[in-house]
Image (tube, grey):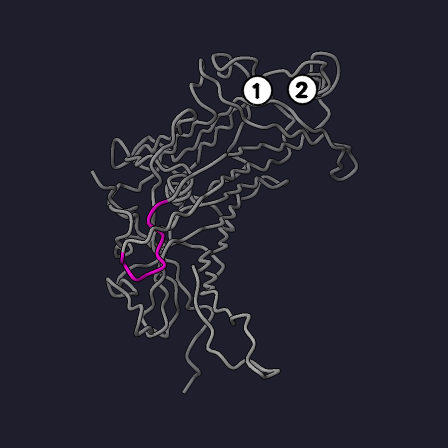
């Protein structure tokens, strides 16, 4: 008989929770790679025992529950869990069967986090983890040189843990949730299907297309997540709430040296200005694959930003310019620091229904 526990039989299943602190059955299996990290913080007490070796039993503390996951070929249908997991806000899609997911995260107030239950395991069904109250601390999208698939890197933080093989922390509901399989016909987000627009105002983006310049990009999103635990007689280390803190959104673009990028009146000129220059940037992805009828899969995101660094690069026999900007709060045109619109085929039930 083969030895049980095959790496190729690992699965990543998520469901958005209706309530904080209440784990739910997964609603979708995702084409991710990586593993969770469950550190129960077992600690030996610093005491005198008359021995060179440990004598007293260790004690547990608040656990560190994280997962570093990768999506090597980002699918349009996998964007909602990432954007909801990072921005929160209880977003629900409109339309159907081509659904539109819109995110306009608040800057001057704090959106309610969207939290997820994560099921991870393999063919050994008595050894599945069930992690609850998950949200993203950081999220990174990379559009590679060569115009291939966008990749995504996720750093998840969880507030509770259970296991199908645990006596004191049993799974509830039972994991793994059955009949969930990774989609076989995903529409992939390719850089070849993207265009970039840069303008001096939000209203100017529609006419701000920059051609023959963008080689690659990296969109980085990170936020501070403060875990709150209260002595409520629950007899668990579970997190009772999150306090999201400062948020950073950064866009790094590698450009060819066209007149839009270098020279007087260019993006590099804006970077080298005596005073910071506000720019508005938008990337528009339109798939060749239809979500339904004549409606293609698509993703558009925009942000107001200011350039902070310029680096020198090279691709093949040509030099390049790498400009990095940080998003800022725009109270007028964008009314925020970031906006995103995704058109795909994921409805609310498949992501997980948010509480009313």
Place residue 336 in its image quadrant: top left
Residue lying at 50% horizontally and 34% vertically, measured from the top left = 247
Question: Dot 2 corresponds to which residue?
Answer: 267
- Dominant secondary structure of the magenta stretch? loop
How many numbered discs sit on the rendered protein?
2
- Residue 68 to residue 38: above or below: above
Of marks 1 and 2, which one's residue comes earlier in the chain? 1
Name the quadrant of the N terminus: bottom left
Give the magenta part as a residue range. 233-241
69 with respect to 113 (left or right)? right
Q: Position of residue 331 (x, y in %)?
A: 45, 16
Where disc 2 sits, the SS reads: helix
> Counting other residues with Cα less than 10 Å from the Cα at mark 2, is it few (<14), some (14-19), or many (20 or more)?
many
Residue on which the image places disc 1: 198
Query: For this rendering, which residue is in front, 137 or 27?
Result: 137
The residue at 38%/53% (across/down) is 159
Q: CA distance from mark 1 to mark 2?
A: 9 Å
| Residue 138 sits above or below residue 271 on the image | below
**Residue appearing at x 49%, y 22% in the figure:** 329
Task: In the rendered view, tell whether residue 166 sits above or below residue 250.
Answer: below
Label 1 residue SS: strand
């Amino acid at each position: 008989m083969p030895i049980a526990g095959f790496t190729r039989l690992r699965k990543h299943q998520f469901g958005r929770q209706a309530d904080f602190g209440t784990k739910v059955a997964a609603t979708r299996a995702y084409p991710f790679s990586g593993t969770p990290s469950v550190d129960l913080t077992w600690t030996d007490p610093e005491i005198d025992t008359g021995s060179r070796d440990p004598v007293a039993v260790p004690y547990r503390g608040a656990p560190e529950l994280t997962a570093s996951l990768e999506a090597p070929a980002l699918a349009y249908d996998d964007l909602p869990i990432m954007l909801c997991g990072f921005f929160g806000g209880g977003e629900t899609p409109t339309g159907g069967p081509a659904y539109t997911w819109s995110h306009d995260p608040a800057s001057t107030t704090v959106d309610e986090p969207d939290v997820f239950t994560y099921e991870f395991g393999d063919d050994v069904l008595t050894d599945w983890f069930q992690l609850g109250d998950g949200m993203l601390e950081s999220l990174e999208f990379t559009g590679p040189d060569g115009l291939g698939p966008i990749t995504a890197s996720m750093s998840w933080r969880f507030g509770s843990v259970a296991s199908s093989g645990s006596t004191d922390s049993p799974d509830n509901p039972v994991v793994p949730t059955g009949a969930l399989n990774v989609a076989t016909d995903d529409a992939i987000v390719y850089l070849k299907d993207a265009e970039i627009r840069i303008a001096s105002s939000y209203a100017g983006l529609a006419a701000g297309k920059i051609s023959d310049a963008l080689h690659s990009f990296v969109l980085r999103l990170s936020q501070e997540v403060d875990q709150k635990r209260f002595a409520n007689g629950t007899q668990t280390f579970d997190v009772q709430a999150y306090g999201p803190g400062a948020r950073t959104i950064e866009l790094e673009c590698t450009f060819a040296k066209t007149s839009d990028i270098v020279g007087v009146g260019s993006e590099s000129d804006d970077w080298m200005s005596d005073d910071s220059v506000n720019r508005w940037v938008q990337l528009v992805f339109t798939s060749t694959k239809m979500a339904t009828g004549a409606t293609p899969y698509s993703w558009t995101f925009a942000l107001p930003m200011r350039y902070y660094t310029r680096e020198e690069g090279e691709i093949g026999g040509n030099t390049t310019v790498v400009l990095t900007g940080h998003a800022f709060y725009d109270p007028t045109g964008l009314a925020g620091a970031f906006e995103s619109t995704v058109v795909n085929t994921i409805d609310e039930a498949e992501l997980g229904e948010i509480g009313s």
